[in-house]
Image: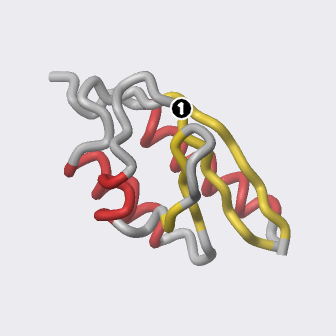
Amino acid sequence: MAEITRTVRIGSSHGLHARPAKMFAQAAKEAGFPVTVAKDSGKPINAASILGVISLGVEHGDYVTLAVDTDDHDAGEATLDRLAELLTTDHDAA
């Protein structure tokens, strides 16, 4: 397995609270391979865990690092693209 990582900045004006965390965790769960997320240089947690994602305490403008563990490089990149888009979008905008 090869790990592919990407660092993104959180776009939601209220950070990763319940609704965006749920959307993100669901997309990570659907990836079909392990996905982790870490805030700054913290310990990576399972990105498919809603409670884990919320427990990171990620605020607007924070940086997180996503990692996927897969031998399918294209699928890994596509998953990171999808997850990064969810994290950089402001889901709190009216």
In this orientation, which residue lies closer to the viewer: 15 or 43? 43
Q: Quadrant of the N terminus?
A: bottom right
The residue drawn where x is 24% and y is 44% is 17
Q: Amino acid at mark 1?
A: Tyr
Question: Residue 50 sits in which quadrant?
Answer: bottom left
* Residue 3 placement (x, y as % from top left): 79, 62
In this orientation, which residue lies closer to the viewer: 55 or 5? 55
* Within-10-Å neighbours for mark 1: few <14, some 14–19, many 20+: some
* Residue 40 placement (x, y as % from top left): 57, 38
Q: Residue furthest front?
A: 42
* Residue 12 placement (x, y as % from top left): 32, 29
The residue drawn where x is 62% and y is 42% is 41
The residue drawn where x is 37% and y is 65% is 26
* Residue 23 placement (x, y as % from top left): 32, 54
Side of 1 where 29 appears, left or right: left
Total numbered badges shown on the rendered structure = 1
Question: Which residue has dot 1 on it?
Answer: 63
Residue 33 drawn above or below residue 51 = below
Side of 70 where 47 appears, left or right: left
The residue drawn where x is 29% and y is 64% is 51
Residue 94 drawn above or below residue 74 = above
Residue 85 drawn above or below residue 61 = below
Q: Residue furthest left?
A: 94
Name the element at disc 1.
strand
Give the image's coloring scheme: secondary structure
Q: Quadrant of the C terminus?
A: top left
Side of 52 where 71 appears, left or right: right
